[in-house]
Image (spheres, rainbow, N blue to C red):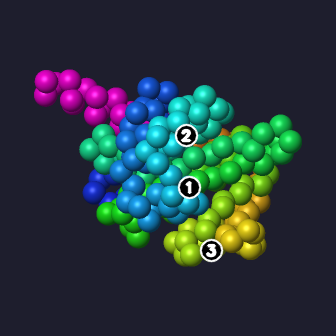
Amino acid sequence: MHEVLPESGVIRKLWIGETAKYREHLLRLDPESRHNRFAGGVSDDFIRNYVELTAGLDTVVHGFFVDRMIRGAAELRPLGAQFPRQAEAAISVEKPWQSHGVGSALLRRTLLTARNRGYQLLHMACLANNHRMQQLARKFAAELTFDFGGEVGEVESSRPTPLSMMREMMSDSHGFATAMLELQSRMLRA
């Protein structure tokens, strides 16, 4: 599964040691993108704490990497024991990479991951004026409902199949190989 992305970017799962890269990405978001991502204004300290908490949960984060920097990210976070077959998806893309298909590619990868983990319902919350996220949710057949000043998109997921599992494994293998080649290239230059 190869997606054409701007500026030779690649999407792959974040490794456990890449928490700092994710934090840096969220801190680089412009005020509007940050507001849309967190449904309100949040401080740098909030983001630092949020990323540390995210690293300790059963969250899967895909990053859109350009030159070893995360320029977009999608989180897949389970909703907890009360909702065992449900998860939440959240997407952030830095301003220069918006409107280039990055959000669609991140959500597509997140939906595949959710499917393969047995989540039956994926929630995407967005502010009422976050038209980009609403459009993205509709693109993936999300049912949007109004909820406390915002929209909630829900996407029902199919059951995992051997083919869907293979697609995720191929994507992960490609991401791993790309990261290893990048690391080797960096080491050779040093």
Q: Secondary structure at mark 1?
A: helix
Q: Which mark is residue 128?
A: 3
Range of residues picked out in magenta: 169-190
Residue 171 shows up from this direction: no
Mark 1 surroundings within 10 Å by alpha-carbon count, few (fewer than 14), some (14 through 19), many (20 or more): some
What residue is pinned by disc 2? 50
Q: Which residue is mark 1?
A: 38
Whether residue 162 appears in magenta in the rendering, the answer is no
Q: Is residue 68 visible?
A: yes
Looking at the rendered structure, the secondary structure element under dot 3 is loop
Could you say which quadrant of the image residue 158 lies in?
Answer: bottom right
Relative to 153, residue 121 above or below: above
Q: Name the amino acid type tagged 1.
A: Phe
Q: Secondary structure at mark 2?
A: helix
Q: Residue at x 73, y 68 (%)?
A: 148
> Label 2 amino acid?
Tyr
Q: Gap in Å between the C-alphas at discs 2 and 3?
A: 23 Å
Foreground pick, 81 / 29: 29
Q: Position of residue 86 (x, y in %)?
A: 78, 48
Contact check, label 1 and label 2, Cβ < 8 Å? yes
